[in-house]
Amino acid sequence: MQCPSTFAAVFFRTETGREPVREWLKQLSKTERKIIGVDIMTVQFRWPLGMPLARNAGSGIQEIRSSLPNRIARTLFFEHAGELVLLHGFIKTTKKTPKQDRALALQPKNAYLKSSKA
């Protein structure tokens, strides 16, 4: 029986070296970071995966759905060449994922794909 492949989780890095998802995670409590980290690791080892942990957010972007003690977090990513590229993270404050958060993930996705072709 063949073991399923594991995807590497990588932080999208801007041209200036910033890693927005890593910066967002550092602002959270240790407990919240651990919950989100376990959720990311679960997706790494079990991808493709669906609800309740992961869901298609449109435009080739997926969201990891993390339930924190008093709020809900989303980590947006896309899969490319065996990697889960972490694009954007946020605390959810509305019922639906806001369009601006999807847009904030789409820009780095397009930049990543453009730079990987170069």
Image: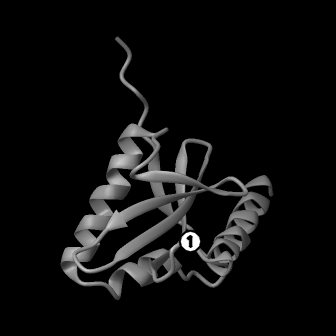
Question: At 68% from the left edge and 71% from the top edge, which residue is drawn?
Answer: 108
Residue denoted by label 1? 96
46 sits to left or right of 86: left
Query: With respect to residue 115, does 68 lie above or below?
Result: below
**Going by the image, does 106 lie left or right of 11?**
right
Estimate the x, y position of residue 25 in percent, counting from the top left: 37, 79
Work out whether 85 lies above or below 23. Answer: above
Residue 50 to residue 98: above or below: above
Query: Foreground: 53 or 36?
Result: 53
Q: Residue at x 40, y 27 (%)?
A: 4
Q: Which quarter of the figure is the N terminus placed in?
A: top left
Indicate whether 44 appears above or below 105: above
Residue farthest toward the bottom in the current orientation of the protein: 27
Task: Give the crowd class for mark 1: few <14, some 14-19, many >=20 residues within 10 Å.
Answer: few
- The quarter of the displayed image where residue 35 is located: bottom left
Residue that protrudes farthest toward the left in the picture: 31
User: Which residue corresponds to the image point at 51% horizontal and 74% vertical from the top-left?
Assistant: 95
Q: Quadrant of the C terminus?
A: bottom right
Is 106 situated left or right of 77 in this image? right
Q: Residue furthest top?
A: 1
Q: Residue at x 37, y 57 (%)?
A: 40
> Residue 75, position in %: x, y?
47, 67
Q: Amino acid at mark 1?
A: Lys
Rendered image quadrant of residue 105:
bottom right
Q: x and y percent of residue 8 in the render?
A: 45, 49
